[in-house]
Amino acid sequence: MTVDDRFTRDFRETDGEEPLGIRNEIVTGPVSDWATDFSHLEPEWVADPYPIQDDLRQRCPIAHTERFGGGWLPTRYEDVAAVAYDTERFSSRSIIMSNFRPPRELAPMGGSPPISSDPPFHHDARKLLLPAFTKTAVAKQEESTRALCHALIDEFRGREVVDAARDYAQHIPMRVIAAMLGFPPEDGPRFREFIENVLEGVNHPPEERMERMQQLFDYLLAQIRDHVDHPRDDLTTYLINAELYGQKLDPSHVAGTMALLLIAGIDTTWSAIGASLWHLAKTPADRARLVAEPGLLPTAMEELLRVYAPVTMARLVKEDMHWHGVDMKADDWVLLSFPAANRDPAQFERADEVVIDREVNRHAAFGLGIHRCVGSHLARMELRIALEVWLERVPEFGLADPEAVTWAAGQVRGPRTLPLIIGR
Ligand code: HEM
């Protein structure tokens, strides 16, 4: 049996000191003016953020809010890109905008490396992950992903209406990342709870959020200990044995990266698959064209990723500064809306239309700069297989009830209820 002392005690145990951090009063309720009081958690934004972002781009391209202790929202592609590339002035110490800012001492690693890390540490933490997510490595998951998609559709037999978000989209990335990390496939429902807590529960009081995070880290610690005792060929064992600067990784690095992969790996792709099926369900011409021309799928997928980009990230301002015409204060948030950047008419022709055969498409759905998505090959493989199998098996489908479709609140946007008529 392998004994690894790093994981025998709970790595979160402290010597009794309260973790430092800034906590702000929680403000919710209707927005008075999106230019001066925006909130991505309010129902109007959750239902349809695009008209709000388009209006802001014209009227006030860097909007402000006093909520969450103060934050900014750039909606032009060039401003989003400028923030994403400028790691000197904007930190990734926390990338989820909430009422709590983690202590500055957490930089440069942050709680979930590499997404929460700043240079130079970021580069080394990211490099550790790259081999597991190359095109070749990801291709190994393709056959089992295809078999899973078929098995999920087999379950539709005899049903006229299915929930494409719950019965199909969510299971695909859950099973794939669980297999890569070496977690039991039947733990899927627990992953869903963790994701909702981290990404959607941002307006819960900090104590409650931490309590909920604790459940995630308890789960991860149990998985780590099991892998220490029974090493196997998966990402968890890889991270346990990985070294940086001649030493094994800090336990909080191992667990933080596992949490990142679990959350970034599931919610995002589930959202992208769901939003694509939602679009095809309500746009029969695009659906029919893809069924007739399956070779167009890779091009169409990029356009669906552009228009329905699921991921918005956040940054923290490092020091007080005058930036692109506004006065930012240290520790202000910047909500980095890749979805808004992707619909900027200064960057894309017919920016708010879905042009499924768009040829030139340098979208920002996977981010820009040093934090650009490590899992993009995996995400594209899952999205391609999910749509390919669906269109082959269920070529005719439509929205069962457009009013019944619900969307995730928070920084990852995708359908969470998506009833489709599949006409069987
Ligand atoms: C359609 C699906 C996905 C989308 C749209 C997406 C989007 C993004 C975006 C926008 C970022 C940049 C974050 C930032 O700038 O702060 C990012 C980073 C990241 N993503 Fe994804 N992602 C997807 C799927 C995945 C998958 C399947 C995985 C792996 C399991 C993954 C792992 C990561 C990691 C590890 C990072 C951090 C990279 C770094 O900080 O250097 N993502 N993703």
Image (cartoon, helix red, strand yellow):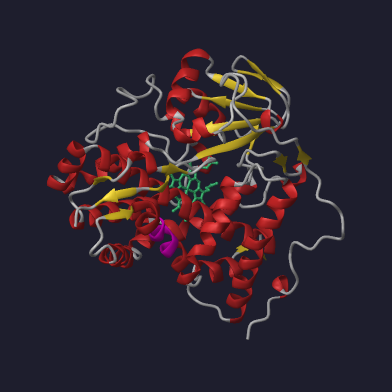
At 63% from the left edge and 40% from the top edge, which residue is drawn?
A: 92
Q: In which quadrant will I find the C terminus?
A: bottom left
Q: Is residue 250 visible?
A: no
For residue 151: magenta? no
Which part of the image, by quadrant, shows the N terminus?
bottom right
Is residue 240 shown left or right of residue 376? right
Q: Nearer the viewer, residue 285 or 302?
A: 285
**Residue 171 in magenta?**
yes
- Residue 287 x, y percent position in the rendering: 20, 42
Q: 189 or 331: which is nearer to us?
A: 189
Q: How many marks?
A: 0
In the rendered view, would you say 146 is above or below 66?
below
Image quadrant of residue 22?
Answer: top right
Picture coordinates of residue 87, whole percent (x, y): 61, 35
Q: Which residues are magenta?
A: 170-176
Furthest-bottom residue in this view: 1
Residue 382, percent from left and from top: 35, 55
In the image, is 17 to the left or to the right of 145?
A: right
On screen, residue 40 above or below 109: above
From the image, give the main secondary structure of the stretch colored magenta: helix
Query: Against 290, is 355 above or below?
Result: above
